[in-house]
Image (cartoon, helix red, strand yellow):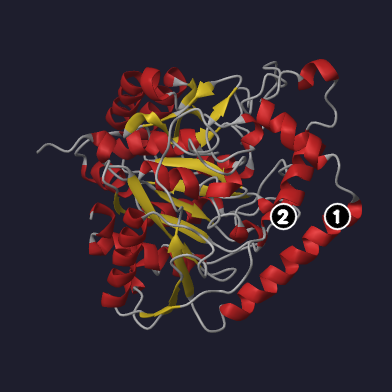
Amino acid sequence: MTTRLTDLTARRLLAGYRKGDFSPVEATRAALERIEETEPQVNAFVRVDAEEAMAQAEASARRWHHGEPEGLLDGVPVTVKDILLQRGGPTLRGSWTIGSEGPWDEDAPSVARLRAHNAVFLGKTTTPEFGWKGVTDSPRHGVTRNPLDPSRTAGGSSGGSAAAVALGAGALSLGTDGGGSVRIPASFCGVFGLKPTYGRVPMYPSSPFGTLAHVGPLTRDAADAALMLDVITGEDWRDWSHLGPSSSVAAGLADGVKGLRIAYSPSLGGQVAVRPAVAAAVRRAVGALAEAGAYVEETDPDFTDPLEAFHTLWFSGAARLVQHLGTKQRELLDPGLREIVAAGAQYSALDYLAAVDTRMALGRRMGRFHTSYDLLVTPTLPITAFEAGAEVPAGSPHHRWTGWTPFTYPFNLTQQPAASVPCGTDGAGLPIGVQLVGPRHADAVVLRAAHTLYESGVPTA
């Protein structure tokens, strides 16, 4: 069977460039053709910059031809979620309230790092309006669909990025994660997604949702994510909360999990109803970690659902985000966003600070938990992808997206690194994700465990 260029990881593309098997021009052209082929059905892109992408690819091909590549990603096709600034075009954030007029002359820190390493920018990917929910549809850009079944959602809010990677429309994509927005679509689309420790990847402008929001990679596997994370963690003075210099996570990727202490929580102490197919796939992934030498214990971090605190912080952020808009502009907003804005405007400063207290208590609890365990493993989501265009599955008792994401948003509150690794499919062929959560700053450990799962063959089980 012939392997398509669009199926290759970033590392395999780079190896091919090095050997002269193919060039960045061929890889970029293949990715653009894949976008043209799939975009009408999936709707993963806000904008595709084909002419600029080919110009970047041609410049990269010349460097490779002369044996002088520059940067770790020279010639690798990438995409960027349309929440993050990318100079040369508008960042519309899925909203009719943002005008497209320029100058659009600034890159977000992570985008600037990709540019410095000579990645090839294919275009901007879809997001719900301002990234406010766990599925990807917006008044401005419509519904983004799951590449494996277009009747289903791709998840969100980095749904366009996850769909692009799953389609082969760029090996790497930048997403953001404020309550699961990298991990949710990674799980639904069958790709790898990492929410790094908060502050590891600098962010500018700051998120309206404050220190809940992280920038992270969506990729075809954990090794590509490690490579990408090493690129995008460079310092940037525009982010006052950036953690500063850090060591390479790619360097120790093959160290494995032997001797790691892993806590396996199938349902957060019975708080979450998990579909049987999801539970079985996650248990198999846990078994693979044990077979690789980890010490696995079924136990729970023992915290109650912090949903109320998360809603207070999230809804307040949404209210602040649109505070400057007049009545007519607010009528252009996603109706669900208008609802949480109205709720957020009712909170007092004391309500907000009470939520911060809950957040800090949860952070201390998880800090203590990780003195005994190197990793916590859970399902990424209790379900697989549901119908496109809906915030919650049909028949759900929940009104908001947080009702079906109880495994993801707690770890935005605690700012811990967390990844979603594909670990199989359900009876309908829809992907299932297993979540790996580490203590703050243990991004390398999370990636090592994820890489172990890929090496074991679990993602294709």
Front-lying residue, 188 or 48: 188
- Hey, which residue is sitting farthest right in the picture? 349
Residue 325 in view in this figure: yes
**What is the x, y in percent for residue 251?**
40, 66
Q: What residue does disc 2 label? A: 308
Which quadrant is home to the C terminus? bottom left
**What is the x, y in percent for residue 428?**
27, 41
Question: Which secondary structure, mark 2?
Answer: helix
Three-letter code for the amino acid on which mark 1 is drawn = Asp
- The numbered disc on residue 228 is none
Question: What is the crowding at mark 1: few (fewer than 14 residues within 10 Å), some, or many (at least 20)?
Answer: some
**What is the x, y in percent for residue 104?**
67, 25
Question: What is the crowding at mark 2: few (fewer than 14 residues within 10 Å), some, or many (at least 20)?
Answer: few
Q: What residue does disc 1 label? A: 351
- The quadrant holding residue 199 is bottom right
- The quadrant holding residue 259 is bottom left
As drawn, is 14 to the left or to the right of 261? left
Which residue occupies 60% across, 47% down?
402
Question: Which secondary structure, mark 1?
Answer: helix
Three-letter code for the amino acid on which mark 2 is drawn = Glu
Which residue occupies 58% across, 40% down?
112
The residues tagged by marks 2 and 1 sit, at their Cα atoms, a distance apart of 10 Å
